[in-house]
């Protein structure tokens, strides 16, 4: 569809090319001499392969990889705003976006919001994404559905409390064979559980409870990924402390998915990116730009150049 739109807009032939394929196609793109830069969004294993192979061939590469985005909810957060935004950020796009909130960290009494989050998530409608009123569409493939449901089962097996089970959701007629997983909410989640450690890429929210704000910051910073994070609070001082001390590269204050507008760079960090130039913004432009330095000397017609070993233009 994007290629068709580009063609309809008059983009010259050859400027945009759509190439489909698997491992061999990826290797071709990394090896082919005329291709000078490779930009990738996907998983860590594929990204590491692309980054290393492209680099060995002298190509510039940027790879946006996995994520495990945490939202921290303080006791003073606006309850309804926090509930609605956490549900939307964890279940929107069926959780299939690298900036989805997949872990909610509740500080102190904020944990009282967890049952309300599960209740709000249970009201989301699952079905075909092109149907009016649907909130959660299908996963991209059967393999994706099987992976997500397997991770949900691992959460149960490892001792997390399943407050809302999205396996086998109720769907409209005609969608029975679709790859659907409904909103799923876990509480009493601990680091070391698969549902905490692994990027699920489905509408699954892991709720973690801590006693203090400092403990919440330490928990977020201990995660190997660094795409994004968010805090929900009415306290400006707490928000500033969070912004200053937190490690992930994109921070939202009462904003669950702090994806910047294109004029700003997508500043994920840690194990969420390989490469020194981020997506979007000035860094994104620089990634696709080859710098060139030109040094020129223009003389009067009667000027006689003196012999010099110091360099061009030396006097």
Image: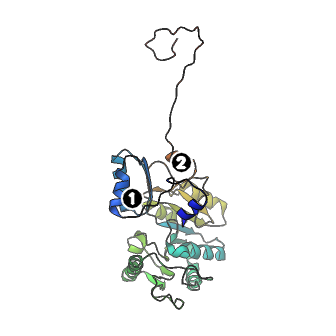
Does any portion of residue 269 appear in the rendered image? yes
Q: Residue at x 49, y 41 (%)?
A: 290
* Left or right for 161, reference 241: left
How is the protein colored in the picture?
rainbow
Task: Measuring from the top left, give residue 33's x and y in whole percent.
Answer: 37, 46
Q: Residue at x 53, y 50 (%)?
A: 284
Report helix, strand or loop for mark 2.
helix
For residue 255, above or below residue 50: below
Query: Label 2: how many residues lie within 10 Å, few (<14), some (14-19) or many (20+)?
Result: some
Task: Measuring from the top left, give residue 291's x and y in whole percent.
Answer: 50, 38
Task: Measuring from the top left, give residue 101's x and y in whole percent.
Answer: 52, 70
Report helix, strand or loop for mark 1.
helix
| Mark 1 → mark 2, Cα distance in angstroms | 19 Å
Q: Is the N terminus in the top left, top right, bottom left or bottom right quadrant?
A: bottom right
Question: Which quadrant of the view contains residue 25?
Answer: bottom left
For residue 18, above or below residue 89: above
Task: Measuring from the top left, give residue 301's x and y in whole percent.
Answer: 59, 11
Disc marking residue 8: none
Does any portion of residue 112 appear in the rendered image? no
Answer yes or no: do the residues labelled 1 and 2 have beta carbons within 8 Å?
no
Query: Label 1: how many residues lie within 10 Å, few (<14), some (14-19) or many (20+)?
Result: many
Q: State the residue in front, 82 or 125.
A: 125
Mark sitting earlier along the chain (1/2): 1
Q: Residue at x 58, y 51 (%)?
A: 281
Disc marking residue 47: 1
Q: State the residue in front, 262 or 3.
A: 3
Q: Which residue is mark 2?
A: 283
Number of dots carrying numbers = 2
Q: State the residue in front, 261 or 74.
A: 261
């Amino acid at each position: 569809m994007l290629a068709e739109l580009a063609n309809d807009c008059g983009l010259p032939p050859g400027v945009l090319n759509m190439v489909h394929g698997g491992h061999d196609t990826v290797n071709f793109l990394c090896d082919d001499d005329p291709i000078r830069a490779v930009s990738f969004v996907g998983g860590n294993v594929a990204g590491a392969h692309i980054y290393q192979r492209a680099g060995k061939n002298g190509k510039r590469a940027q790879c946006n990889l996995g994520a495990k985005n945490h939202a921290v909810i303080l006791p003073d957060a606006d309850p309804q705003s926090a509930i609605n935004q956490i549900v939307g950020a964890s279940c929107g796009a069926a959780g299939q976006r690298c900036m989805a909130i997949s872990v909610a960290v509740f500080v102190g009494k904020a944990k009282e919001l967890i049952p309300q989050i599960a209740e709000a998530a249970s009201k989301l409608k699952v079905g075909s994404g092109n149907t009016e009123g649907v909130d959660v569409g299908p996963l991209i493939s059967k393999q994706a559905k099987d992976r997500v449901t397997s991770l949900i089962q691992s959460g149960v097996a490892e001792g997390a409390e399943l407050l809302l089970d999205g396996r086998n959701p109720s769907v409209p007629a005609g969608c029975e064979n679709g790859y659907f997983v409904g909103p799923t909410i876990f509480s009493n989640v601990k680091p070391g559980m698969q549902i905490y450690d692994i990027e699920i890429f489905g509408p699954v929210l892991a709720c973690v409870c801590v006693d203090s704000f400092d403990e919440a910051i330490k928990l977020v910073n201990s995660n190997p990924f660094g795409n994004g994070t968010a805090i929900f609070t009415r306290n400006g001082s707490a928000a500033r402390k969070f912004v200053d001390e937190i490690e992930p590269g994109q921070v939202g204050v009462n904003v669950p998915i702090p994806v910047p507008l294109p004029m700003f760079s997508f500043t994920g960090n840690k194990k969420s990116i390989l490469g020194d130039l981020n997506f979007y913004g000035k860094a994104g432009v620089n990634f696709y730009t080859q710098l060139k330095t030109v040094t020129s000397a223009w003389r009067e017609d009667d000027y006689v150049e003196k012999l010099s070993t110091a360099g061009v233009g030396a006097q």
